[in-house]
Amino acid sequence: PLGGTGAVLLTKALHELERTGGRYGLVSMCCGGGLGPGAIIAEPPWADMVAVSVIDGDERELKAATVDQKIGIEFVYDVLRPGKVILPLASVYTADEIPMFTAVYTEPENMRRPKEQGRYRSVAWIPPHLLNVGLVRVTVSLTTPVSGKLERHAHLPAVVSFEVCEAPLGVPSARGSY
């Protein structure tokens, strides 16, 4: 029947994606009369980022901090489908895009426990005296550990930034007095 081959190809592509754990598929079909449509199949997302902000130790949003402050990267995210471990990840960079560090939740119990559908909040805390003065940019992702790699569900490059300033005079600093 006209269009039957396209239906078979789409069905085979869906089954192959399910079998291999693939996320995307491409099918090109002939539907008669010289037409040649194509279809891109994408797996629905497991999680989506709702909000990202920089907070201080009292959990107030901030745009600038001093080197002696505790700083948090707050993630608010939705798990759209249950059944996978979803971990927030923050990569911290200088203004020149030089990587400083990456933080991902690594508590063994939570790395093995799949999340239920719903809204979640996590905070990655940066201890005082870890950052140098200057502009800091943060890239965030939602990931799932799979065979030694991280499967990415959401990725927001340089989604937040903040300025780190020197500690006030008289306040102990990792840089010492000068």
Image (tube, rainbow, N blue to C red):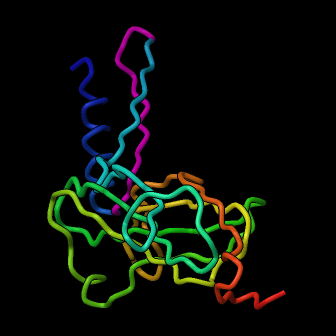
Q: Is residue 72 left or right of residue 9?
A: right
Q: Residue at x 50, y 72 (%)?
A: 71
Q: Is residue 175 above or below residue 88?
A: below
The foreground one among 4 and 152 is 152
Identify the image quadrant of the C terminus.
bottom right
Percent coordinates x, y for residue 95 in the rendering: 74, 59
Percent coordinates x, y for residue 150 in the rendering: 45, 72
Q: Is residue 92 left or right of residue 31?
A: right
Magenta stretch encompasses residue 22: yes
Q: Main secondary structure of the magenta part?
A: loop
- The picture quadrant where one finds residue 98 is bottom right
Percent coordinates x, y for residue 1 in the rendering: 21, 20
Number of numbered discs = 0
Q: Is residue 15 left or right of residue 58?
A: left
Percent coordinates x, y for residue 10 in the rendering: 30, 38
Residue at the far front in the pictured view:
170
The foreground one among 30 and 109 is 109
Residue at the far top in the pictured view:
33
The foreground one among 74 and 61 is 61
Q: Residue at x 33, y 69 (%)?
A: 122
- The picture quadrant where one finds residue 138 is bottom right
Q: Residue at x 39, y 68 (%)?
A: 88
Magenta part of the chain = 21-34
Q: Is residue 7 above or below residue 58?
A: above
The foreground one among 115 and 93 is 93
- The picture quadrant where one finds residue 56 is bottom left
Magenta stretch encompasses residue 28: yes
Residue at the far right in the pictured view:
178
Q: Is residue 78 left or right of residue 96?
A: left
Q: Residue at x 50, y 78 (%)?
A: 70
